[in-house]
Image (tube, rainbow, N blue to C red):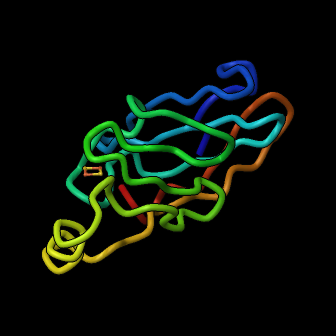
Amino acid sequence: MEIGMVDDLKNGEMKKFTVEGKDFLLVRVDDAYYCADNRCPHMGGDLSHGILQGTVVSCPKHHSQFDVVDGHVVQWTEFSGAKLRITKLLKSPRPLKTYEVTIDGDKLLARLDDSI
Ligand code: FES
């Protein structure tokens, strides 16, 4: 399905969009586009309000970091020591779900069907 246009974002920008009530994150890094769930796998933070550094997005809530290329966890929360161990016991690190984006002319397309 069409999820946006190539001009919707400048390099290094990200934005939230909603399909059938579910929020997704669209990210542009150079001329590559990435799509992921907008909801942080930790406790549901709104990733579109986080910080993007290269392809790594940081959650605004507890600063978990995910690479939008494949969704892998770069850092699970900002906690350390005992607090991090407890956090991991309560909620083990989970990757961010990502969706491949293809470009057709000036349209951005992604298969979101299995998530909505
Ligand atoms: S909700 Fe995102 S790091 Fe906790």
Q: Nearer the viewer, residue 46 or 82?
A: 82
Give coordinates of residue 28: x percent, y percent. 69, 35
Q: Is residue 66 left or right of residue 29?
A: left
What residue occupies the far front of the structure in this picture? Answer: 81
Give residue 98's quadrant in the image. Answer: bottom right
Q: Is residue 87 left or right of residue 103?
A: left
Q: Nearer the viewer, residue 100 or 68?
A: 68
Which residue is depicted at the point 74% across and 19% down?
A: 7
Which residue is depicted at the point 81% across and 28% down?
A: 106
Give coordinates of residue 63: x percent, y percent. 35, 46
Q: Quadrant of the N terminus?
A: top right
Q: Quadrant of the C terminus?
A: bottom left
Give residue 89's quadrant in the image. Answer: bottom left
Give coordinates of residue 32: x percent, y percent. 78, 42
Q: Is residue 58 left or right of residue 22?
A: right
Which residue is depicted at the point 32% across and 48% down?
A: 39
Q: Relative to 101, say whether 49 is above or below.
A: above
- Total count of labels: 0
Q: Nearer the viewer, residue 44 or 35?
A: 44
Q: Relative to 25, say whether 43 is above or below.
A: below
Q: Nearer the viewer, residue 59 or 10?
A: 59
Give coordinates of residue 29: x percent, y percent. 74, 37
Which residue is depicted at the point 69% across and 50% down?
A: 101
